[in-house]
Image: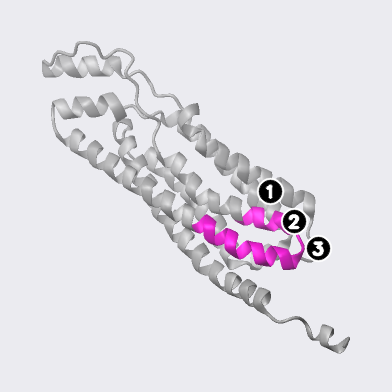
Amino acid sequence: MGELRKPFLLLAMLAIVLAIGVEFGAGLLTGGGDAGAALRDSADALDVELSDVAGVSEPSGRGTGYLALIDAVAVWSTGLYCLSLVLPDRVQGRVQGVATLIFSIILIVISLITLVVAFVELSVMVSLFLATPFGTIAYLALWGFFPVGDATLLLGLALLLKLAWAALLILAQPRFLQNKGLVLLILTTLLGTVLLEFLHRLVPVILVSILDDVGALVFAVVAIIWGLVLLIGSIPAIVKAVRVTAAPPSRAGGADR
């Protein structure tokens, strides 16, 4: 690794772990607003009786949480760099290929499952929204009041942590910039965060949940692509490790005879 500055690398690992923690916890940290008043107004206007709509609140969306699928790749890549601090190169080379293969398969499977979930939810959202008046009221009850402000705060924090992660990686080893895959990964996760914030601000609040799910679909697809990239990239490392393991004893042993 050359002149690797270990403190910066460890801080970079901490920053990206905190970023993915923010994204995973978005559903818990972001609360939905009370939809009861708006629903009662809609019901009165449409002459529909609703027995009890008080306290109904919307889910906080999937987009921010699905960003974690991409950032899992960032955590994994940074973790491999950190692993080089404690493992010899020969041992790391043998372990890295198999571990990356397993990780990529898990990532692809999880991303596929979440892709299906987001697609089904998006289909339900659009169907309900277009099925006026009762379907629209049901949509408003569940997804019509997205907490844009709280989501912006969480996305801003995640973006700040990702920028810190990228900067600390460069400080740890400027030659990381020569790694095209790593640079592309940094750009992917940063652009994904900015894209989701753009989607949240693009439409009126009652439609934000729909675009948030569109963003979630995009992130799941991107995560699958990265999983495939890791899977394909792990194969040469595995083949090399198998060849080294299966190789006959070194010639040094024959010279000692």
Task: Give the quadrant of the C terminus.
Answer: bottom right
- N-terminal-most mark, 3 or 2: 3
User: Could you tell me if residue 48 is visible in this image?
Assistant: yes
Q: At x 26% / y 14%, what residue is drawn?
A: 53
Q: Residue at x 70, y 51 (%)?
A: 168
Label 1–label 2 contact, CB within 8 A: yes
Per the image, the residue denoted by label 2 is 172
- According to the image, label 1 marks what residue? 12
Judge from the rendering whether residue 188 lies leftward or rightward of residue 52; answer left or right: right
Q: Residue 90, image x and y in percent?
A: 73, 68
Q: Is residue 139 left or right of residue 105?
A: left
Instruction: Tell me where residue 144 sits by quadrant.
Output: top left
Q: Main secondary structure of the magenta part?
A: helix
Q: Amino acid at mark 2?
A: Ala
Q: Amino acid at mark 3?
A: Glu
Instruction: Determine the CA span between mark 1 and mark 2.
Output: 8 Å
**Figure quadrant of the N terminus:** bottom right
- The three-letter code of the residue at mark 1 reads Ala
**Dot label at residue 186:** none
Q: Inspect this view and state whether residue 197 appears.
A: no
Q: Please, what secondary structure does the residue beneath circle 3 have?
A: loop
User: Whole-Å distance between the Cαs marked 1 and 3?
Assistant: 16 Å
103 falls in the magenta region: yes
Determine whether 120 is above or below 108 in the image.
above
Pointer 3: what residue?
3
**Percent coordinates x, y for residue 186 in the rendering:** 57, 56
How many angstroms separate mark 3 from mark 2 (CA)? 8 Å
In the rendered view, tell whether residue 46 sits above or below residue 103.
above
